[in-house]
Amino acid sequence: MSTSETTIKANKTELAARGALTKQRRGLPALLPFIGPAFIAAVAYVDPGNYATNIQSGSEFGYKLLWVVVAANLMAMLIQSMSAKLGIASGKNLPELCREHFPKWLSFTLWVFSEIAAMGTDLAEFLGATLGLNLLFHIPMLVGTVITGIATYIILALDRFGFRPLEKLIASLVILIGICYLAETLLSHPVFGQVVYHSFVPWLGSKSAVLLAVGVIGATVMPHVVYLHSGLTQNRITARNEAEKILINRFSIKEVIIAMSIAGLVNLSMMYMAASVFHATGHTGIADITTAYQTLTPLLGPAAAAVFLVSLLASGFSSSAVGTMAGQVIMQGFVGFTIPVWVRRIVTMIPTVIIVALNVNPTATLILSQVVLSLVLPMPVITLIYFTKRRDVMGALVNRRTTTWLASACAAVILFLNLFLIYQMVGSL
């Protein structure tokens, strides 16, 4: 597609959004032009790392850690809406603002840790998709890593046709994952009374429960999409004044609620499926995706196991593409330069290839990667709070005091859990 055709498609979205801002479009037609960024961010909340932590949590502790998923998803809604708002208000993404306002050493340090988070994310996503290919089509793991790399590069190549085709594809994959887990819910027959009760009643009864709870938060609230979301909204729809920025932000909040609600329901269904199928039948040692697939087949039949793998593949391909997008935003924003997408795609494949070649347990690696992500998570959250409470950056969209307090409470919870995790890990040495 030519540059002019891409521009026309972008202008159509801008024109449709302009109709919504001037009240010429109402209801769902008014919201549609703003749908996209939150669904891209939502992919990271249903990536293969979530499969690993949710399945292990559900099989080991039944329904008892569902409240962690609910709490993490509420945090995600708040944090992602703030990130989207930052891009709308400032016209810049979070890493760019860090480079502009922080000393060079601090910006560089944040970049290094953010790249570690991006690599940990990519590791989880690559492993998940590769494992799905291996289990569903019996493709060797090393070959699967190459196929995953090519598939995600093709997804990213859609960006040359404008942002809408990429947004539509990724939103479709999120919906596909949701449909798969709706089917799993119908097949697994969870005890909904237990689901509702444990979704709201906290419980942390052992050291392993704490480790998994931190892993669930690390798998749910993702550092790289805290950075990415602001980049997706910064120049997407041009606001002519502060009043239009407020309206765009209102549409953005609605999209975040829809996208994150879907992601949250998928995460809940992952865990309660594991609780109802594995924990309830005495299979409390399901600690990896391969065993989960092999156990699902005799318990619920091959169809349920196949649906499980289809959702895993959709998750792995889409989230790997999003991880690469985030990596580009992080590098460009913090240090002011970018590398070709294909170079980043190859470089980020290397850790996965090494792990596969060494025959390391994929699911154990997935869970560990989520704990690492949780340890890195406070950094983007704290910087996000810092900028969104500054009126000189945000203008009319500056945080209300309640928003800042709630976000600060989320950061405090994440920090506390991480410190407690480190204390337990050091104590066990």
Image (cartoon, rainbow, N blue to C red):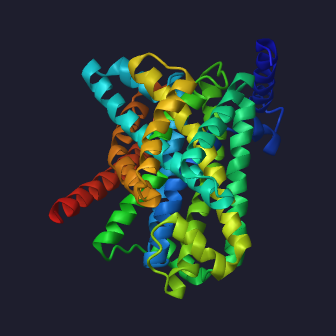
Farthest residue toward the top?
Answer: 4
362 to 91, vertically: above or below: below
What's the residue at 59%, 50% (across, down)?
A: 129
Q: Is residue 135 above or below residue 156?
A: below
Residue at position x 63%, y 32% from top?
153
Does residue 199 sit above or below 378 in this rendering? Answer: below
* Between 306 and 115, the one nearer to me in the picture: 306
Image-based side of 162 in relation to 344, left or right: right
Q: Position of residue 144 (x, y in %)?
A: 59, 47
* Residue 38 in view in this figure: no
Residue drawn at point x = 49 percent, y = 61 percent = 52
> Residue 19's x, y, as percent?
80, 29
Lateral position of residue 249 relative to residue 35, left or right:
left
Residue 77 image point, x, y percent: 53, 50
308 or 231: nearer the viewer: 308
- The reply to whether residue 354 is visible in this rendering is yes
Which residue is at a point 29% across and 51% down the rendered structure image?
Answer: 415
The quadrant of the image that shows the C terminus is: bottom left
Tell me where residue 311 sits by quadrant.
bottom right
- Which quadrant of the structure image shows residue 379? top left
Expressed as whole percent of the image width and height from the top left, the position of residue 305 reads 67, 69
Left or right: residue 339 compared with residue 180: left
Establish if 267 lies above or below 392: below
Left or right, 280 with respect to 418, comes to right
